[in-house]
Amino acid sequence: MKNHLLTLLLALMSLALVACSEPQTPAEPASESPSEMAAESATSTETEGSEQGTEADQASNPLLAASPHPHGYPPFDQIADEHFKPAMEQGMAEHLAEIEVIASNPEPPSFENTIVELEKSGQTLSYVMRVFGNLSGANTNANLQAVQREMSPRLSAHSDAINLNPALFARIETLYNQRESLDLDAESLRLLERYHTDFVRAGARLSAEQQDELRAINAELARLGTEFSQKVLAEVNDSAVVFDNAEALAGLSEARIASAAAEAADRGLEEGQYVITLLNTSGQPPLSSLSNREARERIHTASLSRGSRGNEYDTTAIVSRVIELRTRRANMLGYDTHADYGLEQQTAGSVERVNEMLSGLAPVAVASARREGEAIQAKINEVEDEPFELASWDWDYYAGMVKQDLYNFDDSEVRPYFEMNNVLVNGVFFSAEKLFGITFQERTDLPRYHPDTQVWEVFEEDGSSLGFFITDFYSRSSKRGGAWMNSYRVNSGLLGGAPVVGNHLNVPKPPEGEPTLLTWDEVTTMFHEFGHAVHGLFSDVYYPSFAGTSVPRDFVEYPSQVYEVWASWPEVLANYATHYQTGEPIPTELLDRVIESETFNEGFRTTEYLAAAMLDQAWHQLSLDEIPPAEGVMDFEARALAEAGFDYAPVPPRYRTPYFSHIMGGYSAGYYAYIWSEVLDADSVLWIRENGGLDRATGQHYRDTILSQGGSKDAMELYMEFAGREPGLEPLLERRGLLIVE
């Protein structure tokens, strides 16, 4: 059921809390999840008998009291790890009591006494789960992970107790059958239809025996989802690469080498050792700078082998079992595969449409990547005394040389103009003020969950407070990989309130006193995630089920990808691209080259993304008898890539199966969403360029037609209201430099 509570149960799997993403090519999950995804964060222990804390305990628990801060901003300084379990238990008990009142109401079902009351229910649990899910993703520890493992079964049972409540579903179905005569407004009718659909998809029409089996499946999926997410985080930390001398790190900046030395010291290693930590993508940032080929190979091999090394963090058995369970559940609910089940409610609508798009783009992208590879191989042959065949760990380093030849600059020239706070304030915030009239003021008086975070109050053009925006940009071992947006509070006409949202990146933290200088990809990622943030901040719907980023998975990335355009918009770029030491603006000719180079290496970026998107579909379009056991997972991946034309070794998938957190979380059968959304995004950017660009009229129109509407209307209806036309594929292909195929 896609209501404001059950969408949050997936938060326990810190993989896919809310809208997350990637710049130009994808980064991390997701919008508010539908109930079928929520069920995966669950298991089957009954919650009715869960232990309740004493009244004194409840009174002293800050998660169960009204926040002392404006807009319900969480009192992070008061919240301790031990508060979460009793708060969850109290929240579940309250919610089940509210559901019982609705289901047993002797009055005939009405929209008000059933659907509206469902929307009002579970507010305590909703808030607790938002805070817990966000912290377990951004700043976890052993205590929070233990709570995840213990409570996910009980939260699953809680979800099933609602989804499979026959009396409750009977009331919903009665209203659904009467919907044409209820005289509901469009948003209310959409809500009723959504509840009915989600209950059916959650198993409300199954027999009692089938529902018992479904509960068991949901239970195991919840346990496995938590186990997968925790193993991925542990494995990325365990796979960090240790070097015994600084010479191996030649090519990295002095600040980056100092950070590697500090990481080694933090891990208790000897002086003179250095540690390169990994991100959760296949490619790793140091590969673009390291001149030592052996060092590049060690880092890249460590990255690609994560989760399949046969150690305690190996996830291949989890992957095999999750795919099996998802397929069994889909079959039980009347679908051939999990992909059929998952795609039915997305904008794409069907497996066939997704396959058609991916198969149409794949040969174009791979052909472009191969041409890029040929140019890189030629550069290797030119500069190396003993040339070698291009390997995946060589791509970034030598592509940088090719880029230098073509555009006469490299990232080291550009980074001094992209100081992180300046990009945020004079880039991201500047563009938001130009477009929407909103302003930002830092709130140093509010508590923070980590010293590296900042809190900003957001003000409307008339000076009224809109909500709070939390920024959390540095990587750390307690934080999952990727970049994402989340919500601590959502607003709705029914429940009131104001939004509290956060953006998260994983930028390496420089040594104390050193500036944080971003790569161009990190700059566009910051703008991308802010596109999710304004989607949450500007939400203006009546029902909480439709608030913020509660839209189809393949539409949630659309607003964020559109916002990337402002990173390179001349007026915006000129405002923030200033040298961190001198304050001088980036030279015009260098700026021109930066913009001109945006399509460089696009074959690589598109291919690595599409390979991962295709893997997602390959796994989730399997029938039960086709699913490999743990020992066959990597062989299946290799076959699937080869059969789809992605067997080009220099370009591995952006995520390999054992650490593909998206598809083990909220993006199962949905990783294609980034490219699907980018079709809309590219066409929207064309519309923006044709209709005023960076001005209040453009921003207000976009806010009114897209950002404020949440999921209250069909996604394509929203797009048509914004653009007034059907999107075409050509703007996307042109943007990615893939329009012409040899």
Image (cartoon, rainbow, N blue to C red):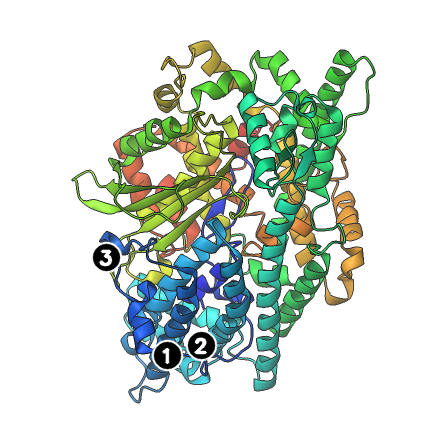
Instruction: Judge by depth and name the residue closer to the eye, 202 or 251.
Output: 251
Can you give x and y, in whole percent of width and height, for residue 537 in the image? 32, 47
Which numbered marker is on residue 622?
none
Q: Nearer the viewer, mark 1 or mark 3?
A: 3
State whether residue 411 is above or below residue 463.
above
Instruction: Judge by depth and name the residue closer to the eye, 142 or 528.
Output: 142
Q: CA distance from mark 3 to mark 2?
A: 32 Å
Q: CA distance from mark 2 to mark 1?
A: 7 Å
Q: Amino acid at mark 2?
A: Ile
Q: Amino acid at mark 3?
A: Pro
Q: Secondary structure at mark 2?
A: helix
Residue where numbered disc 3 is placed: 68
Count the numbered circles shown: 3
Question: Is 245 situated left or right of 209 in this image?
Answer: right
Q: Which of marks 1 and 2 precedes in the sequence? A: 1
State whether residue 222 is above or below residue 472.
below
Residue where numbered disc 2 is placed: 162
Q: CA distance from mark 1 to mark 3?
A: 29 Å
Instruction: Judge by depth and name the residue closer to the eye, 390 or 178.
Output: 390
Q: Amino acid at mark 1?
A: Ile
State whether residue 543 is above or below residue 467.
below
State whether residue 448 is above or below residue 332.
above
Circle 1 crowding by C-alpha within 10 Å: few under 14, some 14–19, many from 20? many
Q: Which of marks 2 and 3 precedes in the sequence? A: 3
Can you give x and y, in whole percent of width and height, for residue 17 in the image? 47, 55
Determine the image quadrant of residue 25. top right
Residue where numbered disc 1 is placed: 99
Instruction: Judge by depth and name the residue closer to the eye, 447 or 714.
Output: 447
